[in-house]
Every structure is written in C-alpha cells, then in structure tokens.
Amino acid sequence: MHWLQIYDPLGNAFLSTLVATLPVVVLLGSIALLKIEIHYSALMGLAVALGVALFAYGMPVKLTAAAALYGAAYGLFPIGWIILNLIFLYQLTVHSGLFTILRSSLATLAPDPRVQVILVAFSFGAFFEGAAGFGTPVAVTAAILIQLGFKPLAASGLSLIANTAPVAFGALGTPVIALSGVTGIDIHKLSQMIGRQLPFFSLIVPFWVVWAFAGFRGMLGVWPAALVAGVSFAIPQFLVSNYHGPWLVDIVASICSMAALTVLLQFWRPKKGWKPSESMEINGADQPVYSRREITRAWVPWILLSVLVFLWGTPQMKDGLNTVSAPEFQVANLHKVIVRTAPVVPAPTAEKPTKPEEAVFKLNWLSATGSGILISAILGGFIMGCSLRELIRIYIETLVRVRYSLITIAAMLALGYVTKYSGTDATMGLALAKTGVLYPFFGTLLGWLGVALTGSDTASNVLFGSLQKITAEQTGISPILMAAANSSGGVMGKMVDAQSIVVASTATNWYGHEGAILRYVFFHSIALACLVGILVYLQAYVSPFTKMVVP
C-alpha cells in the first residue's frame, strides 16, 4: 500500500506554503526571538511538524511516527555519535593539560587573533570538513578558538561562518555523490560545475570571517594572510574538482592553504597596534614557554585524530569495515511506502515508474566517522597517560555534558525527516521554483533552505536535486548549473541549521545560548547565499559567465 505525497493540500498554493513553513517559523522564532532553550525549541518545532503532517497533509499516523523515529535515530547515529566522541577527546586533552600547550603553540605560530581565525576556523576546519563533515569541523575549531581566548559567541559564530566554502565537497565528496545519484547527472560534470562556483567564495570567506570578527579596518590589517589562505585554497579546489573529481578536493585544498599560510607567517606578521574588541578576551598575554617535546606531545592526539578520520573516510576503509559489521534495518511502516509525485519527480512512465522512497537505517557502527574518533580518543588517552578507569569516568562525564545536545539533534532530525516524508519540504521548494526568470537566484536559495532545514548539504541535494533538474529543464536553463547551485547555495545554510549551532554551543560549553549564535550568523548566511545566487544568475544569462557552465 503506497501513500502519495500532495504538495498543495489546501487547494491554494500560497496557503499551503504558509502552513508548510510553520515548523521552521516556530523553531527559529522560539530560538532567536523568544530565546527558548534550543532543546525545547526543537521539540516544539517537531510537534508543529507532526501536526502539519497529520492534519494538513493527511499523512497516516503510522507513517508520521515512523518518519520521526527514523530521523531521531539518524540524529543520534551517526551525527550524535561524532559529537559525543569528539567532545570526549577534547575533554581528555583538557584533563591532561595538553590543550593549554596546544593553545600556546598556536598562539606562538599566529599570535594575532585575526590570523588565528583564518588558520584555525577556515584552513584547519576545511581539512576536517573534507575528511569527516557532519559537524566535525565546527566542533574542533570552536573548541580550539575558545582555548585561544575567544569568547564562546565569537568562537561559535566564526567557526560556523568559516565552515561554508568547503562544505559541498565535505566527507570525501559525499554531497556531490548523492547529488549525482538523485539527478542522474555525471558526477564529474557536477564536480566541475561546483568547482566553478565555490572557489570565488573560497577567496571571499577568509576576508569575510575576519571582517565579522574584527571589523573592516581590522580585516585590512591582515589582508595578506586572508589572500594567501584564500588563493591557496581556491586554486586547488578548482583544479582538483575539475580534473580529478569531488573526493579529495577539501583535503588537498586545506593542506595547501595551511602550508601556504604557515610559510607566509615565517616572513610576514601583522603590524602592531590593532586591539581586539569586546568580542574576544586575551587570556594568554603571557604565554608560558614549552619545550618542543611538550608541544609535539600536545599535537599528537589531534594528529592521530586527523589521520584516523581521514583513513575512516576513504572508500577502501569504509568498504572493508562494512564487510565486518554494517547491519541495515528497513524502517517498518515507512520503507517503500511513500511515493513522491510530479513535479518534484518526473511523471511516471511504463519504462520509468516512480520508485517509492526508501527508509533504511544503516547501523554501520564500525565504519562510522564517530567510531574512528572514539578509537583516536582512546589511543590518545593512553598516550596522555590516562588509566582505563579515568577514560570511563571522563566518557560518562562527557555523555552527561552533551545530553541536551543529543536530545536537540534527535528532535531536529526527526523534524527534518517528517517534513521530507510528508512533502512539506517540497511545497516550500516549489514555491521558490515558481520565480520565472529569477529562478537561478531563487533556485540557489532553495539549496540554502534545504541545508538550513536538514543540517546537511547531502540531505538538501537528495531532497531538492531532482526538483532542480526538472525545473531547469522546464525553464530552459542548464540542469547541471542548477543542480550544482543547489549544493553551492546550500553551503551557506550550514551556518544557521540548528544541528551545527548545537555542535558549536556544545564544543564551547555555551549550551543554552543558541539564539545568540543564530543572530550572530544569520545576516552572514543570508548575504553569502544571495551572493551565490547572483553568481549563478550571471552564469545562467550573462556573458562571459555563461562560458563557465559545464556543457
């Protein structure tokens, strides 16, 4: 028995769209305006999403409950699993005193906090985005920034702003792989097209994130560092995405960016005289001097983390571990029950009937990125001299610390899955798609909306990739351009999705202030998404930008 999605349940497109947006309005409004704690806001948004699905869209109770449980399970694993184990590693380094040494070594390499933002939040964060994704870069960089002296708001917000340009190629190209799967467009063509959009923003973001922190004049004081970090990231990003594929784009580009910035700092330092604003505390003015051996020891857990996360992300390692243990569970009352209808998917034909939506929960506990992080934390803990009893005690303390974060993420993903399977996401998407000649601009914002709702560029591509292709073909625009725009525009929504904000607040021990973080980053998210939309519009209609479109 199949249940067909309906995208205008009220018989009026405008009213249906208003109803579809209610869960998002309740969620974001309660966080940013009413300043309700985010786990309560997420539960409120979920309750509204359930109500809309049941009473407005007529989704059967069993399907609605199954979708919510499926989303909550996915929120806990693999996403919550990553956060829990990453915070566990961080707590171990704090417990051993090594994080203080790490902070001191970074402060010595880049004593100016504006350069620290570029090096840590942009360049270093991009490596973790390329290797793991799913909140890992924000958690790592926010934790490092706060130890460097940044206040929680600045550490959280700047990490979120910096984690944008690399996202489309995150987790070894997973978003592009998923986009190719749902659209049927060649993966190399999609990689090439995204690689002709995001390098512009890889150049901009290092300047932008410093401007958000230090103001325009403060940004001008470190323009050589921003330029070197941006150029050394953007050029490899373009070359690898266009001549190799999506898999190693962020890894190569981030290593080039970190190396180039490190070399620059051997010959250039910002002029003295700039003073940080109230957005930062200088709590390390008199940094103690550590030996090279102590500094090396402080970096070992993070080097170990980087190596294992990268290895865990390679297809060979994932396939090998999945052969050992990767059970899959078809979600009862949901798997292959729901059918998307036109125009979100092509109208079915005898040759190509519409396939029901799958709902398979993969408990690949061994190959999951979080498991690689856990192993690196345990090995790092023993290297730091922790006993097994201490490891267990700190892990339990970490679990207690992140309990509300896990509740929030579970509720957020439950909300996202209910909107996906009920069809409310498609109602919002269709509203943006009906914009005529402005579709390239608003289609890009559709990608932004998808990530803002789901917290994942991969999920946004799965939700709206097919819609982008169909609408582009109907309007005479390149399907490759608009499918790529969904991913490129989506990266700017990464700042404002609740999942990323919770990760940042947890990493900085600032849980309960998510509304302040959302207000901090919201303008930057909208502004950068609009700039991506303008670029895509130019690529659609205006020469010489049209020559950049992959045929």
Image: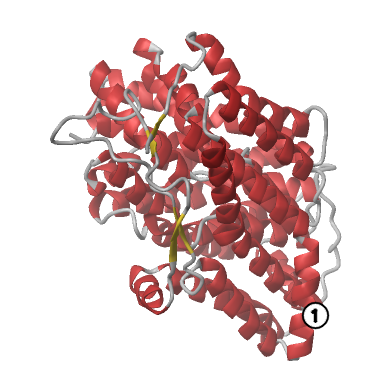
| 31 sits to left or right of 339 | right
Please name the residue shown 67% across and 84% down the image: 297
Quarter holding the N terminus is top left
Residue at (28% x, 26% y) in the render: 470
Q: Residue furthest left?
A: 351
Q: Going by the image, does 50 lie left or right of 394? A: left
Estimate how packed mark 1 is, as few (under 14), some (14 to 19) or many (20 or more) residues with alpha carbons within 10 Å.
few
The residue under the point 50% across, 23% down is 428
Q: How is the image coloured?
A: secondary structure
Q: How many marks?
A: 1
Residue 71 is situated, as x and y percent measured from the top left of the image, at 56, 48
Q: Is residue 355 above or below residue 117?
A: above
Label 1 sits on what residue type? Arg
Element under label 1?
helix
Residue 283 is situated, as x and y percent measured from the top left of the image, at 86, 60
Q: Nearer the viewer, residue 152 or 230?
A: 152
Residue 162: tell me if it is visible.
yes
Quadrant housing residue 196: top left
Please say whether residue 113 is visible from this viewpoint: no
The residue identified by callout 1 is: 393
287 shown above or below 65 = below
Residue 408, above or below 16: below
Is residue 62 or residue 489 the one in the foreground?
62
Tell me residue 380's x, y (percent): 64, 83
- The quadrant the C terminus occupies is top left
Q: Position of residue 133 (x, y in %)?
A: 51, 56
Q: Is residue 488 left or right of residue 46?
A: left
Whether residue 142 is situated above or below residue 482 in the rendered picture = below
